[in-house]
Amino acid sequence: MRYVYLTFILIVVAVVSVLGFRGTKFTKPPIEVFDDMDHMPKYQPQAESAFFADGRVDRLPVPNTVARGTFIENEFMATGKVDGAFANGFPIAVDNAAMERGQERYNIYCTVCHGATGDGAGRTADYGMTAIANLTAAPYTDMKDGEIFHYIGHGSRSGRMYGYKEKLSVEDRWKVVLYVRALQRAANGSVNDLTPATKEELGL
């Protein structure tokens, strides 16, 4: 029986000497008894492929692909459209918290070009950038809420403004629209916008 134990110990020592302990870091490629599919045929990123007509391994997403976890069933909430046409309204709660969040996001992403008041006199104008949209004037004051939402996410038709859908969530884009509407109201407000009680208080 003693020889059985000695033989077993020698076998264990031999196996450990050749294969090492589990988790051991090797300076040379270890002996692979089971390769666990490490060497199966596969394409590498940005490699060539004879299978596809354009010769590229990397493929563009299928048109209209929606990333997992980002699908929003409400068409207006997701696109600013109802039955395929831009529409007015807000699919989020309109309150002070939403307005403050919209102001914060606007100041981070929009003020540099459109200015703090939305008049297009942002910092970039000081460096010679021209044709910056004045959000407080037409045609932007006449745009549907959904259309402004669309341009925030996808950029302008002229290409001068890039979209921010990767930086601003759907909810935050709507909150920026809400704040832009507040800027427009502030720039174009009149006495007629006051409530009767406020007019009476001011003696108007």
Image (cartoon, grey):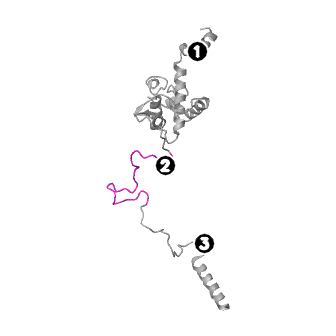
> What's the distance in space between the residues labelled 3 and 1, CA to CA?
77 Å
Q: Earlier in the sequence, mark 2 or mark 3?
A: 3
Q: Amino acid at mark 1?
A: Thr
In the image, which residues are magenta?
A: 44-69
In this rendering, the answer to whether 130 lies above or below 71 is above
In front of the other: 58 or 62: 62
Q: Looking at the rendering, in which quadrant would you find the N terminus?
A: bottom right
Where does the image place residue 165, in percent across and percent down from the top left? 49, 40
Name the amino acid type tagged 2. Arg
Position of residue 182 measured from the top left corner of the image (x, y, whole percent) = 55, 25
Q: Is residue 110 visible?
A: no
* Residue hosting label 2: 68
The residue shown at (44%, 67%) is 40
* Amino acid at dot 3: Arg
Observer-nearest of 90 and 44:
90
Q: Position of residue 22 (x, y in %)?
A: 60, 72
